[in-house]
């Protein structure tokens, strides 16, 4: 098992380098809400894009959706959230701190040891008012999951996308939960993003599809660089299943604070469509043209958190290595996820280097997200890029002006190669696509490098 990453170091790197900030920090912060800075927003976009590409665009049996956050309040009655989406909560009679009842070990407040109240159920949905009147009739909820937007659109999508079972609807979007206990950075927050799939299948084929999605989702994390030994599957026992689930597995990741849920994969049976059919009075049956049967499909639901994925990818990528007399901190992020793909670094600020450095930058940025940096020593600039996970740095030096060649340095190995400027973009494209760094383009050579 790899050494556990220190959460404080990760949080500090995220803040220092502009990945993640506390929300409303200048006002003292808003607990369990976080803002993604310039690099964090790129990382998050890359995670969502990787998910969308492999779950929607590369499959024939999936279509996308972007439903609204505010939904008809009956949705949440039908889904069971109004009655059932609640955690037992207790209060400390001494310090007034509020806890989830299952966080209490010996009947005492974990903070001050004070006596605690009897558990009460606390609904996790945020309420707000729709329109200008603030009364019960105008109450709506901020969605606690994106899934219900998919279920209520099942008939719309089926009618327009001309899909036959089995097929899925995928959605990425914000969700809100008034969590009682939060913490561990972006692990459990009150506002977060989800990447959810509702996959509709014919009853009888559900077990096979459940297995398919367990494999598919587990391997997605591995393909994007998460080490196998830091992932495991946890099967929910029957008494722990959510109200809608017939079976459920969590993909767990070894976060800095220990194993925790990264994604849930649930067998929801026909619970949701049957409930919405009953509450809306609409027919949500599927007509099977092959057998002539009408039935409510079963649903397999892989449901992942974008923020938890970001935390897992950051944790898995974080590394510290001895480097001469110092420690090199780096993020070994998969190239698809790295916020910046290529940094362009003229060896110095000397004016003669600038026109070529600018030309190279102009070419490379047409294809990849880049940073141009000419401040401080080349060694420091390499370290800065290592720390934000940039896979490749390109250096332009005085010799480049004569031989029209530039140097590419690889983040993980710190090895360098020298390539003709004309070959640079295609070479970078191949390396970012997984070609071994040692493979040279025409006219390229190995290079001892500048460190
Ligand atoms: N529709 C199914 C559903 O909502 P869930 O297990 O409650 O299932 C799915 O949530 C995923 O959403 C979790 O595995 C986690 O990644 C993420 N998630 C849930 N609550 C979260 C929170 N408070 N903060 C951050 N991510 C959360």
Image (tube, helix red, strand yellow):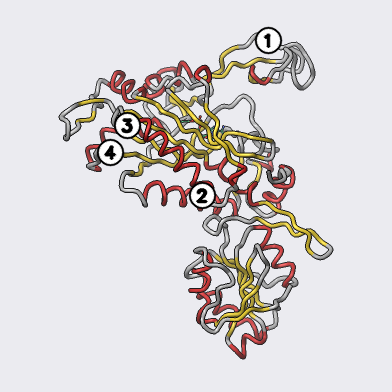
Q: Residue 293, image x and y in percent?
A: 18, 27
**Which of 396 and 302 lies nearest the eye of the viewer?**
302
Disc assigned to residue 47:
2
Circle 3 sits on which residue?
A: 205
**Sequence order check, earlier mark of 2 and 1:** 2
In this picture, residue 436 sits left or right of residue 271: right
Disc assigned to residue 117:
1
Circle 4 sits on which residue?
A: 157
Q: Which type of secondary structure does the marked residue at label 1 adopt?
A: loop
Q: How many numbered dots are placed on residues in this image?
A: 4
**Sequence order check, earlier mark of 1 and 4:** 1
Residue displayed at 59% across by 83% down: 405
Q: Which type of secondary structure does the marked residue at label 4 adopt?
A: helix
**Sequence order check, earlier mark of 2 and 3:** 2
- How packed mark 1 is, by other alpha carbons closer than 10 Å (few <14, some 14-19, many 20 or more), is some
Q: Label 4 CB, ligand 1: below 8 Å?
A: no
Q: Label 2 CB, ligand 1: below 8 Å?
A: no
Marks 1/4: CA–CA distance:
48 Å
Marks 2/1: CA–CA distance:
42 Å
Q: Residue furthest right?
A: 325
């Amino acid at each position: 098992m790899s050494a556990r990453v220190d959460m404080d170091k990760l949080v500090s790197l995220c803040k220092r380098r502009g990945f993640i900030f506390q929300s409303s920090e200048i006002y003292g912060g808003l607990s369990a809400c976080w803002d993604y800075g310039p690099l964090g927003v790129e990382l998050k976009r890359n995670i969502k894009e990787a998910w969308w590409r492999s779950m929607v665009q590369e499959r024939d049996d999936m279509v996308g959706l972007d439903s609204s956050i505010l939904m008809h309040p009956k949705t949440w009655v039908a889904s069971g959230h109004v009655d059932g989406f609640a955690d037992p909560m207790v209060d400390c009679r001494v310090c007034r701190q509020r806890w989830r009842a299952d966080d209490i070990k010996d009947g005492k407040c974990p903070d001050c040891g004070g006596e605690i109240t009897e558990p009460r159920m606390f609904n996790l949905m945020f309420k707000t008012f729709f329109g200008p009147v603030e009364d019960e009739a105008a109450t709506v909820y901020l969605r606690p999951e994106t899934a219900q937007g998919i279920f209520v659109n099942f008939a719309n999508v089926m009618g327009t996308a001309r899909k036959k079972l089995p097929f899925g609807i995928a959605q990425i979007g914000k969700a809100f939960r008034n969590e009682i206990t939060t913490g561990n950075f972006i692990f459990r927050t009150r506002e977060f993003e989800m990447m959810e799939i509702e996959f509709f299948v014919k009853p009888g084929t559900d077990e096979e599809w459940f297995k398919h999605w367990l494999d598919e989702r587990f391997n997605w994390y591995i393909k994007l660089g998460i080490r196998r030994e830091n992932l495991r599957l946890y099967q929910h026992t029957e008494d722990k299943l959510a109200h809608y689930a017939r079976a459920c597995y969590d993909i767990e990741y070894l976060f800095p604070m220990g194993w925790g849920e990264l994604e849930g994969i649930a067998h929801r049976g026909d619970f949701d469509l049957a409930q919405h059919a009953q509450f809306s009075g609409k027919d949500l049956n599927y007509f099977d043209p092959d057998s002539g049967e009408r039935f409510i499909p079963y649903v397999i639901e892989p449901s992942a958190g974008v923020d938890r994925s970001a935390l897992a990818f950051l944790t898995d990528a974080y590394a510290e290595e001895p480097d001469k007399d110092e420690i090199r901190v780096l993020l070994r992020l998969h190239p698809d996820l790295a916020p910046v793909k290529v940094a362009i670094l003229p060896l110095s600020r000397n004016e003669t280097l600038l026109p070529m450095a600018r030309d190279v930058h102009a070419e490379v940025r047409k294809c990849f997200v880049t940073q141009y940096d000419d401040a401080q020593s080349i060694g420091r600039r390499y370290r800065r890029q290592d720390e934000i996970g940039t896979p490749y740095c390109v250096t332009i030096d005085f010799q480049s002006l004569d031989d029209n060649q530039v140097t590419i340095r690889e983040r993980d190995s710190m090895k360098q190669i020298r390539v003709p400027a004309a070959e640079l973009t295609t070479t970078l494209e191949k390396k970012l696509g997984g070609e071994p760094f040692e493979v040279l383009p025409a006219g390229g050579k190995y290079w001892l490098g500048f460190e």
